[in-house]
Image (cartoon, grey):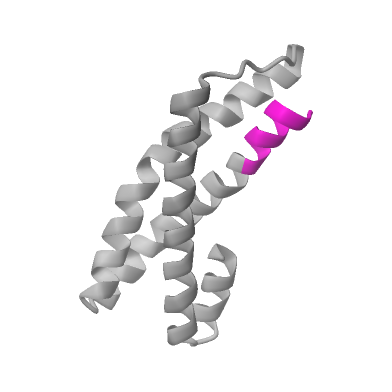
Amino acid sequence: MLVLGYCLIKAGKRGAHKAVMLSACGTSAVFLVCYLYYHAHHGITRFAGTGMLRTAYFLILTTHTILAAAVPPLVITTLVFAARANWANHRRWAKVTFPIWLYVSVTGVVVYWMLYRL
């Protein structure tokens, strides 16, 4: 949804961009609630890999976790500027928020894959 929203705004389709980005926000919010609920009830799963794989996992996990903490305030700030039709500030914040949010989304899948499937 993030990449689609980016493509839509670059194509000048503001209405579709708004719908997709609000869907991305909703999906992310639901995921966060489910993630926190799961980990509050399940606990910690230890990574079983060794060597360079373990190092790579923890490097990705660390950057993912730090940036994931930044995503909600970044997204909320970006949304507030959009809601107020403050397009200059919305664009300025979106240029920072988008790559961080996308990185967190992609590395979340990578961390899951490495932890449970690798």
The residue shown at (39%, 47%) is 71
> Relative to residue 105, is residue 112 drawn left or right?
right
Magenta span main SS: helix
Asked if 15 appears above or below 77 in the picture, the reply is below
Magenta region, residue range:
109-118
The residue shown at (43%, 26%) is 40
Q: Quadrant of the N terminus?
A: bottom right
Q: Quadrant of the C terminus?
A: top right
> Which residue is at the far front?
41
Percent position (x, y) of residue 55?
A: 66, 18
The residue shown at (51%, 20%) is 43
Q: In the figure, residue 36 lies in which quadrant?
A: top left
> Which residue is at the far right?
118
Disc tally is: 0
> Relative to residue 74, is residue 34 drawn left or right?
right
Percent position (x, y) of residue 107?
A: 60, 41
